[in-house]
Amino acid sequence: MSDGSALRLEVGDLLVATPSLLDPNFERTVVLLLDIDDDGALGVVLNRPSSVAVAEILPDWSDLTGTPEVLFRGGPVSPDAALAVGASMTFGMESTDIEPLGFRRLYDDVGIVDLETPPELAGPMLAHLRIFAGYAGWGREQLREEIRTGSWYVVPSTAGDLFGTDPLGLWQRVLRRQPGELAWVSTRPADPTLN
């Protein structure tokens, strides 16, 4: 893609780090876009699980999180703050007008879960939950410039990307399912000298 200004970014898209993106915060990451407007964009890194169990930090929510049951490093912005992304019980089915308590729908059946909501009230309406420490953020036009200069591939997400049980292999899986030459990028080793 040669011109990032012509790109239409949408909530729910994935940003997949290109091999040229060597920033340690984002190298080989897959970021789910949660918000985008004229002021900037916000997302969470999907493939950086931490070693910290959710039960250690947010014990009331630990029974609702999927495998792996750890906090994910969502990005370099506000790493001490927790952000929860969940899917309502209608995940993958025809949507209904029923919204779980403390849930703000972003796209399809995926939304932000307010961690101030009592889990016993929100939990029964949630099919999936993942909790992130921090997030990734871009200022006005910053993300489009990074895309234009070749730091990110923009691809559609699938249901398994956000809540999959093997987050460490996500970068390769997302690229492998893309059409054309982009699928070949998935075979590139982290250290090209090992090729």
Image: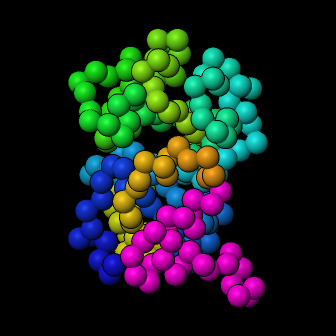
Q: Position of residue 73 (x, y in %)?
A: 63, 46
Q: Quadrant of residue 56?
A: top right
Q: Nearer the viewer, residue 5 or 169?
A: 169
Instruction: Assess whether residue 189 is covered by the magenta stretch.
Output: yes
Left or right placement of residue 80 versus residue 141 in this view: right
Relative height, residue 40 to residue 153 (above, below)? above
Question: Which residues, given as a range, are shown in magenta?
Answer: 168-195
Q: Nearer the viewer, residue 88 or 15?
A: 88
Residue ranking furthest to the front:
93
- The answer to whether residue 112 shows anywhere in this view is no
Residue for point 61% across, 52% down: 167
Residue for point 49% across, 19% down: 123
Residue for point 44% across, 84% down: 181
- The answer to whether residue 16 shows anywhere in this view is yes
Relative height, residue 153 to residue 54 (above, below)? below
Relative height, residue 148 to residue 101 (above, below)? below
